[in-house]
Amino acid sequence: MSLLHLPHHDGSPLHVSHEAPTLGQTVTVRVRTTVQDPVEEIWLRTTYDAEPVFHPTTATAAGDVVWWEAQLPVHNPVTHYRFLLVRPAPDGEGAAEGEQEWLTGSGIVGHDVPDATDFRVAAFPPAPDWGRDGVVYQVFPDRFARSAAADEREAPDWALPAEWDDEVVFEGSDPRTPMQLFGGDLDGITEHLDHVAAVGADVVYTTPVFPGESNHRYNATTFTQVDPLLGGDEAYARLSTAVHERGWRILGDLTTNHTGDTHEWFLAAADDPEDPHRSFYYFDEDGTYACWMGHGTLPKINHANLDVRHAMVEGPHSVVGRWLRPPYDVDGWRIDVANMTGRLGDIDVAHEVARAVRATAAELRDDPWVIGEHNHDATGDVDGDGWHGTMNYSGFSWPVWSWLRDPASPARAFGRPLPVPRRDGGAVVDTFRSWQGTLGWRATSSSWNILGSHDSARIRTVVGGDCAVHRVAAGLQFTMPGVPMIFAGDEIGLEGVNGEDARRTMPWHRRGEWDTRTLGTYADLATLRREHPALRRGGLRWAHVEADTIAYVREHPDESVLVVARRAAGGGFTLPLGAGRHVFGSEPGGSDLAAADGTSTGSGIEVPATDGPRFDVWVLDEE
């Protein structure tokens, strides 16, 4: 079913004249319709201090396309808006007025809906260009690579030393799981940056490097030094220098929601009820305390207390600020458990914390990037001057998994009691629309498109080991709005049933086991994304949807790109677009698209049938 005839607006340059205006400016916004679609008039509806206000639009035809243009006053720091479309009354019904529909961020609706999916512009600086245009590579340090120095370090008492080829303990609540130490370190990452380059990434993101009595280190014992098991402060400085020498960026990982129960702050607080650090946590009179999800080893930080906020997130000498300065020069943060930070019962200072993190980063660096972990609904947390974006599980990972999951796969989606359901293309596109509308265009474009992470199953396991379907997933990751984040090992086909199992070691000495073809696909997709601004900054129009096929057009003032993803064999179909030059195919074959009737413009293009899963991209001629 073709969708290109539908009225369309998004936050891309073709539709919004300025994505980051200042308060009080006026922005030009445009809606695209076609001459075949009988729209009589369109009104822009926005709100002034939560009061609806309507502005007229003017229409201009350009061939088969009609552009409706309006002026949007940026009256509030986050300005919401939508469009009211009027169509002719149905013939024979005798109605005096036309039919009315709303165009919102989640599409066309024929009834009144709340403002939750309104379009929006924010009068705050956007995420930095290097982040939005980049490719992120996530490393779990203990499992990525060991330097020679790692062999000389003694394992601490809490650890269960493991050989590099040992299996990961991951089933149930086995107490060995967080204690299994494989000995990867930061110099090991530095020594393998050529591999990161081969994947096509240019942003290195590591999970925490602070000392913690676990392999994941989210239970920090201090925020003032790097774990000696990883090589200490000097190794982190070496990694940062090596990353920056390549012209890349590096992101840290900080848990603002909790510390470990062996953290120096917590030990002082637990030992003495009069200690100033007592107010850093939520202690009851009987000595019990709030913790993350019932885990007593992860006491929750009380951000309602201004002293802990100053120590943790506010100013250059806070934890956030310390690591953004030399010699570490971290370029930004991924904030762990950002959704719960500052929230407990009737307390909610989450956005104040997010704002403080971002303000501290902006004080110390010209172009920092701050991403908040949120595995559910980040609505409201990414609208303005807090997190630039989120790890977009709900808006990207789960719909992709739902479309491509092998029904027999043992993969588990964290946070759910059941696997994600397998759904057809129509339901998946509806999901994408809903989340893009709810999060907003700018936040969606600045969020991470993830097929998996250290907290989830591996995409290769989700698709039942099917290499071709895995490559389709990678194609979606690199060509949809958002920033691709690759969990180290996905590019060579590593598997994992859940987050712990996904933390398998990189088999550097067993390269014969690597899926080098998929590695090449990741590299080619990274190059493709860099070469085509439409894939980084262009809008998104859904073009064609069937159960096993999803097609969309990414549109930018410089070019338009057609993307076709297929999870299985499928027939050909026609789209009302100009001819296209084939620039990428995940499988052998693929050719340019000529006009369907053989003329230079024709009546559209014929997308060919395919005999199995594949992913293709074409650069389109002007229509």
Image (spheres, rainbow, N blue to C red):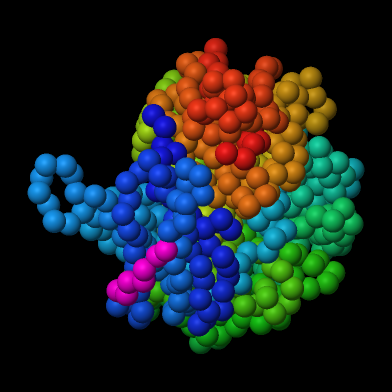
Q: Nearer the viewer, residue 167 or 127?
A: 127
Q: Position of residue 33 (x, y in %)?
A: 42, 48
The image quadrant of residue 56 is bottom left
Which residue: 69% across, 68% down? 368
The answer to whether any part of residue 502 appears in the image is no
Question: Does 58 appear above or below 274?
Answer: above
Question: Does 558 appear above or below 576?
Answer: below
Question: Does 384 appear above or below 89?
Answer: below
Which residue: 17% across, 57% down? 97
Q: Nearer the viewer, residue 347 or 354?
A: 354
Which residue: 34% across, 60% down? 42
The image quadrant of residue 442 is bottom right
The answer to whether any part of residue 114 appears in the image is yes
Q: Which quadrant would the N terminus be assigned to in this image?
A: top left
Q: Which residues are magenta?
A: 52-58
Left or right of 520: which side holds 257? left
Query: How many numbered discs?
Result: 0
Left or right of 597: which side holds 344? left
Q: Nearer the viewer, residue 469 or 558?
A: 558
Left or right of 387: which side holds 247? right
Q: Which quadrant would the C terminus be assigned to in this image?
A: top right
Q: Position of residue 158 (x, y in %)?
A: 65, 51
Q: Position of residue 251 (x, y in %)?
A: 71, 59
Q: Nearer the viewer, residue 616 or 14?
A: 14
Which residue: 72% across, 39% down? 528
Q: Is residue 136 magenta?
A: no
